[in-house]
Amino acid sequence: MQIDADESIGESEYGDGVQLLAPDGRRRDHPDYPLRVTAEQCRALYRDMVLTRRLDAEAVLLQRQGELGMWIPSLGQEAAQIGSARAARPGDHVFPAYREHGVALCRGVEPATLMGLFRGVNHGGWDPATHGFHLYTIVIGSQVLHATGYAMGLRKRGTEGAVLAYFGDGAASQGDVNEAFNFAAVFDAPVVFFCQNNQWAISEPNERQTRVPIYQRAAGYGFPSVRVDGNDVLACLAVTASALERARGGGGPTLVEAVTYRMGPHTTADDPSRYRRPEEVELWARRDPIERLRRLLVAEAYAGDDFFAEVRRDADELTAGLRVAVRGMPDPSPEAIFAHAYAEPHPLVQEHAAAALAAIGADA
């Protein structure tokens, strides 16, 4: 697939979005977001993105084969996720929505544990405190309000660290998100709102969601914002690192709008060919985030054939092990659904549990 050497982010899609890596792999400077990265760091970012894409592709196959109940693909959004996630420190806390598979990998969540949620054998499976990574949130936008409350708690206790909250362009229409913006601004909460604008809220395009670019909304609440090329992993890293540093230093919230594209369906229950044009998909395919970084690695002699072969082997090993792990997951016990409804035993839950287990025993 050919790409014009001068093709950059289009004004209609990105406006004044920050870009440090052009689609042809050329580095660019930005006066507000200088970034110095080593060859090793660039290779690590590339590896993260490739593993994320392979994990995502394997999960789609597993769902099609009946091994997962559903999957929410992240194809095309690897740069936005990996760049922003690698900007966070271990002491920061991340609140995802439900598509942040690359962020989960960066926060140390085992892929098989992640798959357990979509197989229906756990309700999340990982400890948010251990990973600094909250559980996936299916209710649209609610995690942004949770993130703001957590960040307000950090500030009140004088605890170091910042919060990184992910949401999509569709979630920006939710009341919870707008309430979170207001609370964060008023209380100077150390939170970075990271919107992955992938152009489609299920089947609704941006123009049906908002009359102004999403990042401009922050001005109405009284805090700064920035739009970034979401297919540029270096720009996402630099912008998010700057926003998180500002939050840690007491500067309050920042809204980052990463303009990217969902190359696949909204979920495996969706057919995107019913609502978007092939020409649009083709345009965004030429901005592929992984290929963009690969071009930099080759052009700067940061990596050669041996490295790319090693990454492919790592990805093969990851997906092969994942397939075995998913198929071998034991079904949860019937009483497991009642175990964590409340932090402490609750008589009403105990009553419901007893009735359900008795009915199961009778049916058996």
Image: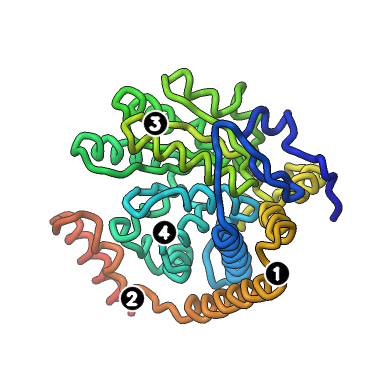
Residue that badge 2 annotates: 363
Q: Residues within 10 Å of mark 3 (few under 14, many from 20)?
A: many
Q: Nearer the viewer, mark 1 or mark 4?
A: 1
- The residue that appears at 34% across and 48% down in the rendered structure is 92
Query: Within the image, what quadrant is residue 214 found in?
Result: top right
Give the Cα separation between the discs numbered 2 and 4.
Answer: 43 Å
Q: Is residue 59 left or right of residue 298?
A: left
- Marks 1 and 2 in Cβ contact (< 8 Å): no
Residue 81 appears in the figure: yes
Q: Secondary structure at mark 3?
A: loop
Looking at the rendered structure, the kind of residue marked 3 is: Pro
The residue nearer to you, when weighing 94 against 99, is 94
Residue 172 vertical position relative to residue 23 in the rendered view, above or below = above
State which tag comes first along the sequence, 4 or 3.
Answer: 4
- Marks 2 and 4 in Cβ contact (< 8 Å): no
Residue 153 pos. (x, y %): 24, 38
Residue 147 pos. (x, y %): 35, 41
Residue 31 pos. (x, y %): 58, 32
State which tag comes first along the sequence, 3 or 2.
Answer: 3
Q: Secondary structure at mark 1?
A: loop
State which tag comes first along the sequence, 3 or 1.
Answer: 3
Q: Nearer the viewer, mark 3 or mark 1?
A: 1
Residue that badge 4 annotates: 107
Give the Cα separation between the discs numbered 1 and 4.
Answer: 28 Å
Give the Cα separation between the discs numbered 1 and 2.
Answer: 61 Å
Residue that badge 3 annotates: 253
